[in-house]
Image: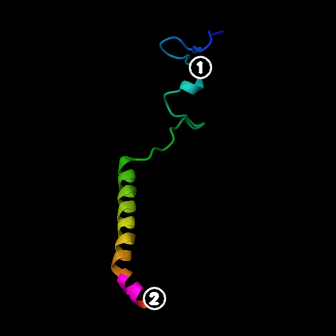
């Protein structure tokens, strides 16, 4: 039993059987690693979000006076 306020794992590395400290991602039952999200995909999604938000705000700025004139 560890002393109060101290970790049960006072050694340099945790026991290999402890799943809480696993360094590799879990594998599927057939032994294949789960698919990873690539850097290219993350960059493309980020750029599409940036362009989408920019277009949305730009359109409001462009059509704002027209909408204001029509609504009064």
Q: Where, by quadrant of the figure, is residue 65 drawn?
A: bottom left
Q: Quadrant of residue 66?
A: bottom left
For marks 2 and 1, the one nearer the N-term is 1
Which coloring applies here? rainbow
Query: Can you say whether 57 is above or below 45 in the image?
Result: below
Q: Position of residue 57 (x, y in %)?
A: 38, 70
Residue shown at 59%/26% (left/top)? 19
* Residue 1 in the image: above or below residue 59: above
x then y, percent, for residue 14: 53, 17
Q: For label 1, count other residues whose C-alpha is less than 10 Å away and answer few (under 14), some (14-19) or many (20+).
A: few
Q: Which segment did they paint magenta?
A: 65-69
Residue 71 spot, x, y in % from top left: 45, 88
Helix, strand or loop: magenta stretch: helix
- For residue 1, the mark is none
Q: Which residue is mark 1?
A: 17
The image quadrant where one finds the C terminus is bottom left
**Residue where numbered disc 2 is placed:** 71
Eyeballing the image, is 72 above or below 42?
Answer: below
């Amino acid at each position: 039993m560890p002393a109060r306020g101290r970790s049960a794992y006072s050694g340099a590395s945790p026991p290999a059987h402890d799943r809480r400290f696993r360094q590799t991602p879990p594998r599927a039952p057939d032994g294949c690693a789960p698919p990873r999200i690539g850097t290219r995909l993350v960059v493309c999604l980020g750029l599409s979000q940036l362009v989408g938000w920019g277009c949305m705000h730009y359109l409001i700025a462009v059509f704002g006076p027209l909408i204001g004139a029509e609504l009064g």
